Structures are given as C-alpha cells and as structure tokens.
C-alpha cells in the first residue's frame, strides 16, 4: 500500500448521535448519579453503564470470593464501580454457595440434575455438577441500602440462579423506590426448590412493576433427541408479525425487563430530576420507545437547560432506525431472500444492520460511519449471496490507533480470507477480499480487530469511555465478471 494512511484515531466524540448521543445530552444535568445494583456480578458489570461516565454508581454483589477479588482488582481505578463480596437474600446470615463446574451456574440452590439430564443441551451434567461448596455471607438489600445511604434504585439487575425472589423480598420497601428491574427468570426447574417465573412476576407486580419484554429467551432440546427439529415462531408488534426460524426445544429461562408504572405514567408534580433519571435509565437500557415517552414528558414540564437537553436527546434517538423500518427490512429480506449480485452493490450503513458489534451510525463529511468496538469483532449479514470470485470491498476511514489497521482480519461465511490492502484517494484503507466459494445463503462478513480502546484514553480531556475499534465507511460487493 502507499505511504498514505487513514486517520490514526477518531477526532470527535462517538456520542454524537443515536443512543449514546441522547445520553450525552442528558447526563450532565443529573444532580445525582444513577444508582445501579448488580446482583450476581460474575464476569463484570454491563458495559452499557460506561456511556454515562461519572453520572452512574454501580454496586456489584458477587459472593464467590475469588471472583469478587478479581473484579475488585479490575475496577480498582474506576470510581463508578464497587464490588461487594457478599450475596443478597431474604434473610441475613451465612449460607452455602454451590460452585458448579461451569462457574456461571453457581447458586445458593443445588442444581436439579434430573432436569439437567432431561434437557441436556441447556446445562449438561458435566457443567452443572457441584465441584465445591463455600460458606458466604448473605445480607438483605434494604439493610445494606440503609447502611450505605441508598434511598432509591434506578436499576436492579439480577443474575443469581434461582435466588431472585429472595432478593426481592429482602429489598423490602426499597423495591417500591426502584424504577427498572432486569432479571433472569426460570420458566422450568433448574435448581432444587428455586422459585420460578410466576413467583418472581407476582412479587414485582405487587410492587408496582409492569412486565415490559423478554430480551432473551433460552430453549433447550431434549437430551437423546436423534435429530433437531425445526419450527417457525412468530413475534407480533402491533399488527406486524415477524417470523423467527427456531430449533425445537423447551423454554428454560429468560431475561425479563420490568418497568415501574410510575415511569410510564408519572404522577402529577413528579420531580424533574426523577424524570431525568428515568429518561437516562431507560435510554441506557435500550428502551427507545419508552425513552421517547419519558423525554417528551420531561421536555414539557422542565425548564431550560433540562428541557433543551430532552429535545436534543429526542433528536439523537431519531438516528436509530424506527422499529417499523427495521421490521419492514426484515420482512423484505424474508420475502425476497438473498440473491447473487449482478451489478455493484453497497451496504446502507445508516440503515439497521442485521449483525453485531456495531455502534450507532455516525454522520461524517463523506457519508456515514459505523464504528466497531463493542467487542473484538463486528459482523453483518448481507441481503445478498456471494458467488465464487465476487469481490467484497471494505473501506475503513479511521481507527482508534494506527497499529489497529494492519491487524484487521476478515471472515467470509465463517472462514478467514486473505485481504489486499490499498489506500483510497481520501486516505481511507481499502480491504479487498475475493469470495473463495459460493455463499450457502445470505453472506456474512466479519471484521476482527485488536482490543477496542476507550475514547477517553485517546482524549484525556473527555470522560467518554465508549470503546472504539475501526470505522467502516463503506462495504461494497462487486460481481465476478
């Protein structure tokens, strides 16, 4: 390639538009940081809270001492996160934590191995068997909150393998002063004696919560099944249905999102700062339709500068493609199917992407950019089929640091492919890959990058911790002659 190089790093904050832009407009007006309780913090707290900079305080509860120590070391220099090496429950005391071979299944309840054997594809006996048992301290959440001066929870997240109902009971009146709950729920037995979804749902509804959605549903095929069966499930939103191809199996567990009714229907005279905190929380959690409702209420009752910030946030959220457009794109894709290209074809980076690992679209002088950085890879499923000899061009207009660009690798349809690297007249890096074979269906293109870099490491004057990899400026498919 020539000596010209693309921009070595982003020169503008990634929170320009979309969900991140909305949070940037709102967070500076919070008079208190958002309070997030993360019960079951193994592997670390959710990255979404990094978008709030110093406007959030996350307390993670992790009773496995070894894991808690690892997390404390990980967040040692992060003033927004603290880790408590204790468990939450209904009764204070010392209880047994059952450590399973797959540590993510560890629980205050024993695994139900009979159910594990029956639905082996969800939790095999090998992964579910207990390998250790340790005594751990358990506290009530309301007692801990009183001791630490916590009067309100904006978000309660629970991933505690069957102990969800115990934590809710241990929250006492604090649960009525909680705005959103994201919790794992079990729809069929997984642990001996652990409450199921119905009990958790009843406790939350009694405290004023509305079930909002199931962002994750997990099925398990029966152990010993000779072959996987297939079906098509349907998700309806309003009067539009979206078919979802599925593999047969029993519904085992889910992630459930609950919203307190006062978030959707704020009582008269609601404090502006409480409305603002609700707007920040629902936006951070990706509930964009609810965020639009809360922001509209906030803009109506608040004075400037908060009212102006609410309007700016609404504008920023409009960069996220409307749900109807997304559903329509899915339906058109399903109706027409992926077809080989017969003329040069380009991916619309401003439209919803059927893929993973991408930040919201960002306007740029020469079009739209899509930054990677949510993970070490970003992939997109194209609505076209590749034929052997077709050329895929990926134009990278920037990177978090210059060393990242030579290290970028590409996969086509789950297989690594060689890249030819050139430079465009605008200084962007151009990756050209040739499809080695026909795609079996809609082509999948994946970019692999080194470790994403937080924006604040590139610009110390900023507290924006959004992680960035490389900036995709164009993706084109050129048919084989």
Image: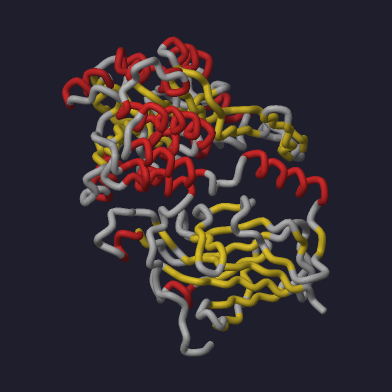
Q: Is residue 290 left or right of residue 476?
A: left
Residue 377 placement (x, y as % from top left): 52, 60
Residue 123 placement (x, y as % from top left): 55, 35
Residue 66 in view, yes or no: no
**Which residue is depicted at the point 48% across and 12% down?**
202
**Which residue is depicted at the point 58% across and 77% down?**
430
Res. 248 image quadrant: top right
**Which residue is depicted at the point 54% across and 49% down?**
319
Query: In front: 226, or 243?
Result: 243
Q: Is residue 245 left or right of residue 58?
A: right
Residue 479 placement (x, y as % from top left): 78, 73
Examine the rendered structure and indicate whether residue 226 appears above or below residue 400.
above
Residue 408 placement (x, y as % from top left): 51, 71
Res. 178 image quadrant: top left
Res. 425 image quadrant: bottom right
Query: In front: 53, or 220?
Result: 53
């Amino acid at each position: 390639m020539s000596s010209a190089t693309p921009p070595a790093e982003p020169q503008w904050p990634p929170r320009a538009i979309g969900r991140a832009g909305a949070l940037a407009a709102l967070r500076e007006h919070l008079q208190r940081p958002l309070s997030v309780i993360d019960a079951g913090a193994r592997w670390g707290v959710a990255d979404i809270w990094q978008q709030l900079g110093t406007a959030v305080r996350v307390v993670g509860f992790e009773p496995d001492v070894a894991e808690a120590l690892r997390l404390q070391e990980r967040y040692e220099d992060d003033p927004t996160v603290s880790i408590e090496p204790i468990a939450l429950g209904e009764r204070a005391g010392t209880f047994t934590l059952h450590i399973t071979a797959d540590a993510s299944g560890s629980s205050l309840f024993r695994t139900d191995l009979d159910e594990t054997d029956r639905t082996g594809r969800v939790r095999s006996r090998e992964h579910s068997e207990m390998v250790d048992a340790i005594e751990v301290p358990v506290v009530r959440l309301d007692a801990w909150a009183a001791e630490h001066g916590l009067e309100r929870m904006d978000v309660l997240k629970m991933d505690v393998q069957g102990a969800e109902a115990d934590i809710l009971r241990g929250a006492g009146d604090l649960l009525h002063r909680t705005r959103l709950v994201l919790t794992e729920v079990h729809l069929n037995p997984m642990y001996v004696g652990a409450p199921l979804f119905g009990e958790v749902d009843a406790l939350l509804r009694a405290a004023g919560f509305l079930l909002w959605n199931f962002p994750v549903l997990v099925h398990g095929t029966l152990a010993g099944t000779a072959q996987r069966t297939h079906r098509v499930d349907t998700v309806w939103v309003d009067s539009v249905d979206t078919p979802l191809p599925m593999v047969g199996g029993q519904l085992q567990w889910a992630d459930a999102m609950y919203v307190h009714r006062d978030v959707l229907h704020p009582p008269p005279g609601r404090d502006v700062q409480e409305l603002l905190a609700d707007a920040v929380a629902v936006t951070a959690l990706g509930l964009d339709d609810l965020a639009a409702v809360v922001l509209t209420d906030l803009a109506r009752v608040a004075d400037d500068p908060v009212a102006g910030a609410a309007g700016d946030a609404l504008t920023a959220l409009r960069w996220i493609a409307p749900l109807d457009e997304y559903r329509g794109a899915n339906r058109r894709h399903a109706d027409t199917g992926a077809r080989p290209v017969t003329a040069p074809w380009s991916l619309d980076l401003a439209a919803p992407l059927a893929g993973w690992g991408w930040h919201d679209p960002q306007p740029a002088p020469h079009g739209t950019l899509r930054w990677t950085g949510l993970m070490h890879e970003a992939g997109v499923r194209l609505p076209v089929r590749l034929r052997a000899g077709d050329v895929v061009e990926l134009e990278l207009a920037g990177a978090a640091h210059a060393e990242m660009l030579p290290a970028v690798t590409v996969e086509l349809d789950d297989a690594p492919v060689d890249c030819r690297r050139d430079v465009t007249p605008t200084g962007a890096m151009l990756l050209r890959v040739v499809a080695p074979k026909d795609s079996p269906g809609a082509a999948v293109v994946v970019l692999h990058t080194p470790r994403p870099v937080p924006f604040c490491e590139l610009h110390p004057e900023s507290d924006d911790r959004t992680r960035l990899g490389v900036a995709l400026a164009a993706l084109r498919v050129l048919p084989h002659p």
